[in-house]
Amino acid sequence: MSTTVNTFFWFDANVGEAADFYVAAIPNSAVTSSTPGPDGSPFVVTLELAGHSITLLNGGPGHPLNDSASVQVIVETQEEVDRLWDALTAGGGEPGPCGWLTDKYGLSWQVVPSALFTLMSGEPARSMAVNTTMRTMSKLDIKTLQDAYDNA
């Protein structure tokens, strides 16, 4: 018997447009299936975002997206943090604290440099300095986080 885990998000509308937006922003991503609704527009869209399966449903109002669920994207470089941040906030997205943002469709994201995990798992005083610094940021900056670690 096989088990599959998939992330599922309920949208009010526009899942086809949102899926295309996400696939364009995240490298190595694609829409894998789309089921039309009664009016012919996408009703259920499944996509792979860098190997992670996500399904989007045009469920209508009643279950709005909020920051209690988010998609975390871990990247290697500041350039990729910057690129994803700009792509995902484009067109009406909103920056949030500590590397979080909300895109124009209302889905919450965390754009996280992989270096953060190393910096946060080091010596406790240094990790706390990184944590304190991170709390002052919106988009995460690797150099600033590294400086906080090094100067603690």
Image (cartoon, helix red, strand yellow):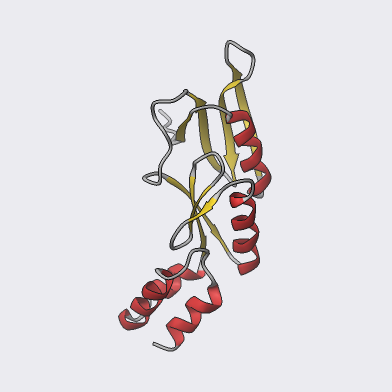
Residue that sits furthest to the right in the current view: 24
Where residue 79 sits: x, y (%)? 65, 66
Q: Quadrant of the N terminus?
A: top left
Task: Say which of 105 and 53 sits in front.
Answer: 105
Q: In the rendered view, would you say 111 is above or below 44?
A: below
The number of discs equals 0
Where residue 133 sits: x, y (%)? 42, 75
Where residue 22 sits: x, y (%)? 61, 42
Q: Quadrant of the C terminus?
A: bottom left
Q: Is residue 90 left or right of residue 133?
A: right
Residue at horizontal 54 percent and vertical 39 percent from the top:
105
Residue at horizontal 39 percent and vertical 68 percent from the top:
135
Task: Say which of 85 and 146 sits in front.
Answer: 85
Q: Is residue 121 visible?
A: no
Q: In the rendered view, would you say 67 is above or below 15?
A: below
Residue that sits furthest to the left in the current view: 124
Q: Is residue 101 left or right of residue 40?
A: left
Residue at horizontal 44 percent and vertical 63 percent from the top:
98
Q: In the rendered view, would you say 120 is above or below 125?
A: above
Residue that sits furthest to the bottom in the current view: 151
Q: Is residue 9 left or right of residue 40?
A: left
Residue at horizontal 36 percent and vertical 45 percent from the top:
68
